Structures are given as C-alpha cells and as structure tokens.
C-alpha cells in the first residue's frame, strides 16, 4: 500500500463538488437585496456554508489534474432547486442566530 497515493488523493484529486456549488450560490445570493442587511463576516459565511453542506448530498468528482470542474449543469435540474432552497435556508438560519454576539 502506497501512502503517498492516498495523500495525493486527499490533497488534489478528490473534491466535493457540492462545496463549489454551495459557495457559488452563497456568494451570488448574498449580493441580492433581500439579504443586504445580514452579517457576512467570515464566521457567518463559514457557518452558512457548513449548514448548507450538511443538508446536501456530497458529490465527489475526480479530474486528471485535480482541477475543479464546473459547475451547476453537472447537477440535475431538481438538485439545483434543492441547492437554492438549502442555501437560502442556511442564510436565514445563521443570520437569525449567528454564533457571535
Ligand atoms: Zn457574522
């Protein structure tokens, strides 16, 4: 067994694509007027991303170089609606109850 291969997989070649999509959606949604007054400090952004990721299925992808593949079109349409809902839910939940004062 070659441990270096596992290190490489971990560092480069195995990537949860759901993270990209969630962060992408979070960034876009937070520019909308509806969310203009909520806290977007690092802590809250981490909390929102974690919250959404914990409610969505992980989707692991591999690429030859470990490059991040794009984007939403890899998910089916229904999943995309779920993503929107979960990310909005994450924003609302965390902004109502931030983990800082
Ligand atoms: Zn905050």
Image (spheres, helix red, strand yellow):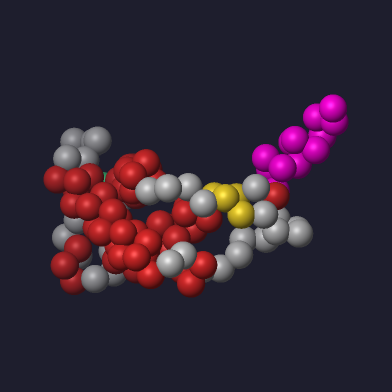
Residue 37 place in picture, x, y as percent: 16, 60
Residue 69 place in picture, x, y as percent: 60, 64
The image quarter containing residue 32 is bottom left
Residue 55 part of the magenta segment: no
Quadrant location of the C terminus? top left
Q: Is residue 54 above or below residue 35?
A: above
Q: Residue at x 53, y 55 (%)?
A: 17
Q: Is residue 68 above or below residue 95?
A: below
Residue 17 left/right relative to 23: right
Report the number of discs: 0
Instruction: In this rendered view, identify the residue nearer to me: 98 or 49.
Output: 49
Magenta region, mostly helix, strand or loop? helix
Quadrant location of the N terminus? top right
Q: Is residue 87 visible?
A: yes
Residue 61 place in picture, x, y as percent: 61, 54
Residue 52 place in picture, x, y as percent: 34, 48
The image quarter containing residue 21 is bottom left
Q: Is residue 6 above or below residue 1?
A: below
Q: Residue furthest right?
A: 2
Q: Residue at x 48, y 47 (%)?
A: 58
Q: Residue at x 24, y 36 (%)?
A: 100
Q: Which residues are magenta?
A: 1-12
Q: Residue at x 74, y 36 (%)?
A: 7
Q: Is residue 46 visible?
A: no
The image quarter containing residue 97 is top left
Q: Is residue 93 above or below residue 81?
A: above
């Amino acid at each position: 067994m070659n441990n270096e291969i596992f290190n490489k997989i971990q560092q480069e070649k195995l990537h949860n694509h759901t993270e990209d999509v969630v962060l992408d959606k979070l960034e876009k949604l937070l520019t909308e007027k509806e969310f203009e007054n909520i806290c977007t400090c690092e802590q809250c952004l981490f909390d929102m991303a974690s919250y959404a990721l914990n409610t969505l299925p992980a989707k692991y992808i591999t690429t030859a170089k470990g490059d991040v593949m794009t984007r939403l079109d890899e998910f089916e349409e229904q999943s995309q609606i779920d993503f929107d809902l979960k990310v909005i839910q994450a924003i609302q939940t965390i902004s109502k109850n931030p983990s800082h004062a």
